[in-house]
Image (cartoon, helix red, strand yellow):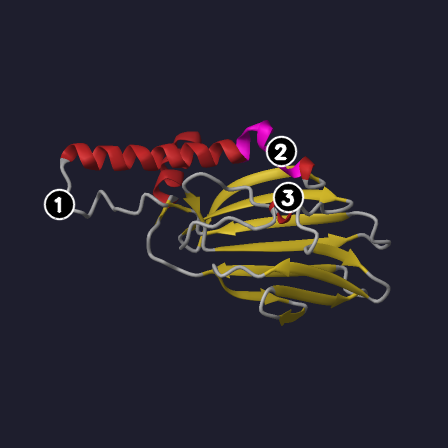
Amino acid sequence: MKRYFFSAAAILFLLSGCLSFRAIEYKITFDQKFETAKIVITYEDIGSDKFIDAKKDTGLTATEKEEILQDRKDDFAELLGMVQDDKQLLSGVEQGIYFKKRSLFEKDNKLIGRYEGIFENLKFEDEEESLRILKDEIFLTLKKDDDIERIETDGKLNQSENIITISWPKTQKTIYWRQILKEDGETLSLLDEYRRWKNKTD
């Protein structure tokens, strides 16, 4: 899992700081006239770049272990803020999205984060990137990033040296693409922190 930042904030980088994730999926469902759309953004296998496992590393002192565990607790607290603090919603507004729901949950022994909202137009900072509704197709253009291992999609994928494009027929009202990041082994899941928090709130 790699700590990862999008080149275009407009296609939504909502995790920050020391947080990381293995993959991110976008699912968009347009209305019949393509005037508005629902968007679901899912972050898979959320972790922390505090990658030393204090529970297993026997070479650490008690103080060092406590500091690492506290750092991981702080990272999870930051993650909670991103799904609970209303200030985080401003990031979506700047990108043309009104978020209606944010959640954390466990799936397949991994911590998942999800944002759900609606939009009329996605706003991109980079002029080379866009999601366009054309006469006969839906067309997405993204700048290529070396941290991406591969892309999965239900559309037609094309990649050049610097640009990624995905197209869908306009008859298809729901589209998705998923970006899987390269693993570098330098992160640990925040699932344990989530489970402890969940047990306290249930």
- For the N terminus, the image quarter is bottom left
Q: How many residues crowd around disc 2 within 10 Å: few (fewer than 14), some, or many (20 or more)? A: some
Left or right, 90 with reference to 49: right
Boundaries of the magenta span: 83-92
Indicate which disc, 3 or 2, sits on the residue closer to the N terminus. Answer: 2
Where does residue 30 sit, x and y in percent of width and height? 77, 53
Tell me if residue 22 comes above or below residue 61 in the rendering.
below
Of the two numbered discs 3 and 1 in the rendering, the one whose residue sits closer to the viewer: 1
Type of the residue with mark 3: Glu
Disc 3 versus disc 1: distance between alpha carbons?
Answer: 43 Å
Quadrant location of residue 32?
Answer: bottom right
Could you tell me which residue is drawn at 77 percent across and 57 percent down? 132
Quadrant location of residue 100?
Answer: top right
Indicate which disc, 2 or 1, sits on the residue closer to the N terminus. Answer: 1
User: On the image, numbered disc 3 is attached to which residue?
Assistant: 116
What's the mark number on residue 89?
A: 2
SS for dot 3: strand
Could you tell me which residue is drawn at 42 percent across and 32 percent down? 77
- For the C terminus, the image quarter is top left
Tell me if residue 108 comes above or below residue 170 in the rendering.
above
Type of the residue with mark 2: Leu
